[in-house]
Image (tube, rainbow, N blue to C red):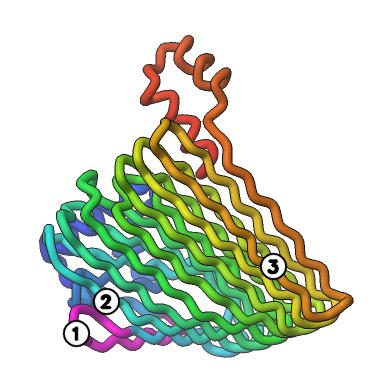
Amino acid sequence: MNIDYSKEFEYLVKTYEKTGDDASPLMDSKYDSLVINQDRVLAKNETEGIKIETKKIKDGVSLKVYIKEGIVKPLPVHLCFGMLPREGKQVIKSEFFVGKKSKVKFISHCSFPNAKHIIHIMDSKVHIEDGAEMEYTETHYHSKEGGVETYPKLRGRIENGGRLKEEFKLVVGRVGLLKIDYEVEQLKKSICELDTKVYGKENDRIEIREALLLNGEYASGLAKSRVVLKDKSYGNVLGEVQGNAPYTRGHTDCQEIVYGENAVAYSTPNISVKNSLAKITHEASIGRIDKKEMETLMARGLNEEEAVDLIVKGILK
């Protein structure tokens, strides 16, 4: 296991823990892991069945992760990306290859604890072979200044009988500017779930596009988003599902909660069917925090701010 035990590494580990997750796997040789600060690889560990290749690029790191055919990883792979300076740019270009009938789970953290003005670009490609399964959970931790611009982009392809579950979560600190652009092509009997949870405050701006292209028979997919908007924050969610093959089943589910007079929320489901045997549905709602629930919490000793945050945690858990 190759670790740079610098102050950078220790600091990133501490911010990792502030999201509520256990950072000890980053220092345990039983776990596959990768830690990157800005454009430097601080730690990397590989066990049997996985290969992680990294290369320094302008403003960041390019990485390719290979899971060999037939490999079932019993422990999650831990990834940590971050920037400790207050200003700068980080580009992460990642590509994941999951071999036939393999199974793997990634736990990823992106930390920008001191950000005044930071641009974070995450450009990812995912290739899931026949019968393979991949789960990817991405949690962000940002400073309270709102100075982070985050651009997560995903292009994925799931082969016959493959599965992908992708979760994006940004609820700690300020969002700043967030532009998510996810698009996944699904082949025969494949399954995909895209799940996004974001808490916007002050003048945060959130734009989300989640698209599923159901191109194979019996493919099924869910594009799900939960967004809470407070103060003067702005949210715009576009959920796209295309039923392009027989017996495909797809659903887009968007729920936005607005708290305060100046927050703005938009939701646009975009669904289409190009085969008479396909079925695509959508559900979208924009509401407010339950007044009775908030009054109950305040009667138990919480102030208004604490009550709102507790309710939001329940919505975005």
Tell me which residue sits at (70%, 74%) in the image. 242
User: Dot 3 lies on which element?
Assistant: strand
Question: Which residue is under mark 1?
Answer: 58
Cα distance, mark 1 to mark 3? Answer: 38 Å
Determine whether, in the image, residue 260 is placed left or right of residue 114. Answer: right
Label 1 amino acid?
Lys
Q: Main secondary structure of the magenta part?
A: strand
**Between residues 60 and 43, which one lies in front from this camera angle?**
60
**Residue 4, horizontal then vertical, whole percent:** 16, 71
Label 3 amino acid?
Ile
Res 315 quadrant in image: top right
**Residue 145, horizontal then vertical, whole percent:** 20, 46
Cα distance, mark 1 to mark 2? Answer: 8 Å
Magenta stretch in the rendered image:
47-62
Tell me which residue sits at (64%, 65%) in the image. 270
Circles 1 and 2, Cβ within 8 Å, touching? The answer is yes
**Between residues 299 and 33, which one lies in front from this camera angle?**
299
- Binning the other alpha carbons within 10 Å of mark 3 as few (below 14), some (14 to 19) or many (20 upward) gives some
Label 2 amino acid?
Val
Q: Say whether residue 114 is visible.
A: yes
**Residue 224, horizontal then vertical, whole percent:** 60, 57
**Residue 59, horizontal then vertical, whole percent:** 19, 79
Question: Which residue is under mark 3?
Answer: 271
Cα distance, mark 2 to mark 3? Answer: 32 Å
Of the two numbered discs 1 and 3 on the same chain, state the one appearing first in sequence.
1
User: Dot 2 lies on which element?
Assistant: strand
Single out the residue that lies furthest toward the right. Answer: 277
Of the two numbered discs 1 and 2 on the same chain, state the one appearing first in sequence.
1
Of the two numbered discs 2 and 3 on the same chain, state the one appearing first in sequence.
2
Residue 150's label in the rendered image is none
